[in-house]
Image (cartoon, helix red, strand yellow):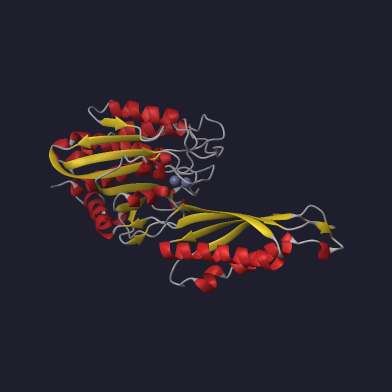
Amino acid sequence: MEEQSWFQLIPQTQMIEWRRHFHKYPELSFKEFKTSAHIIEILKSFGPIEITQPTPTSVLGTIVGDYPGPKILLRADIDGLPVTEETNLEFSSENKGVMQACGHDTHTAILLASIKVLMNLRSQLHGSVQVIFQPGEEQVPGGAQEIVASGQLHDLGAVIGLHIMNGLKSGSVNVVVDGPATTGADAFELTIQGRGSHGSMPQEGIDPITVGTEIINQLHTVTSRFTPPKDLNVVTVGEFHSGVAVNVLPDTAFIGGSVRTINEATRQAIAARVKKIIKNTCDTYGATYDLNYQFAYAAVVNDPKLSQLVKNSALKVLPKEMVPNGTMMSASEDFSAYGKVAPLCFFLLGGGNAEEGYPYSNHSPKFIIDEKALINGVKTEVASVLEFLKG
Ligand SMILES: [Zn+2]
Ligand SMILES: [Zn+2]
């Protein structure tokens, strides 16, 4: 680690003020109108940044360095969650039932601070820097794919994103240098249409509960019998509803499930297997069905070269013990959508762990992070951009 002259350009006090403002006024996915307006206001105060809105509540900012060169994109997600805050922080949510419970307020503030620093370093940049403040990360199919579909992201050499995560040492920068940084998450909803009848005359009906239990039992063989053990795959049935009375054979049953994968080929193979089990079992019993299989977020797969650059950049500006080996996050992220436009690096910023006094995980109504962690996110983002655009 080396002290960099640009450390003094980091607007530390302002960054915390911004973060607390976004925390106090959270907005739900795709409804981030005030949030995006406030981001634009802050960006404008930095000077000549080109600003566009690829989607109604997103903000894309561009700064051009003094020399020609490649283009790099930094991303922050900005949305809150439908959670009622129970932190008792003085800047607790004023929007009842909505909370920045995943820390996206910190991502927004970190990115604003990074772009402010980079504005002042334009004379050193060989290329340009874009920042995307992205809506709707928490709601499938996610805001990232809309931004990619807008066509406004092009000629990018790299996309970097971070996520604050409790349970990890405050301020630590955790980079997976090769391979999946998150799992992918897909979901399915199945309605089995049987034929209701009297409970004493099952032969007159088609029992959707029996069909459903057969399907569930077979679904539990998908990962154990049909996917390579080295992959991390999960098929979980989280919902099974049917019936209203002990003596009535119901008409329908509902099954809802979640699928986690880290490999695209296996992801497709699991979907095909799930569909086959459902079709064949329903056919056997004479039931019909309606299946909604939703491909939601693919796994975020880090590019080895870019991720090594980010890790090395972090080591340049942070003490070695603050840059441990990154491990995959089991949660999922729509950041993977940017993989369509450039190589990716997604890393985790420690928000503090239980020993440090931050015991509540992301999405908890009591989720609190250590604000002292934020500056390490800025240092890593700025150092990575400087390295990528050093010419
Ligand atoms: Zn979240
Ligand atoms: Zn999140």
Q: Residue at x 22, y 35 (%)?
A: 63
Foreground of the two, 380 or 273 = 273
Q: Residue at x 23, y 51 (%)?
A: 313
Count of marks, rendered view = 0
Lateral position of residue 334 relative to residue 376, left or right: right
Of 350 and 48, nearer the camera is 48
Left or right: where 391 falls relative to 347: left
User: Which residue is outermost to the right?
Assistant: 200
Residue depicted at 61% across the width and 64% down the height = 279
Q: Nearer the viewer, residue 280 or 217?
A: 280
| Residue 190 against residue 19 in the figure, above or below | below
Please give left or right for residue 235 compared with residue 239 in the image: left
Task: Please tell me whether residue 288 is drawn above or below residue 84 in the rendered image.
Answer: below
Asked whether residue 82 appears in the rendered view, the answer is yes
Decide if residue 350 is in sight here.
Answer: no
Residue 208 is drawn in which quadrant?
bottom right
Question: Residue 245, percent across and down?
Answer: 82, 54
Q: Is residue 97 above or below residue 275?
A: above
Residue 371 point in image, percent of width and height:
38, 40
Residue 16 percent coordinates (x, y): 36, 34
Image coords of residue 49 (percent x, y) = 25, 30
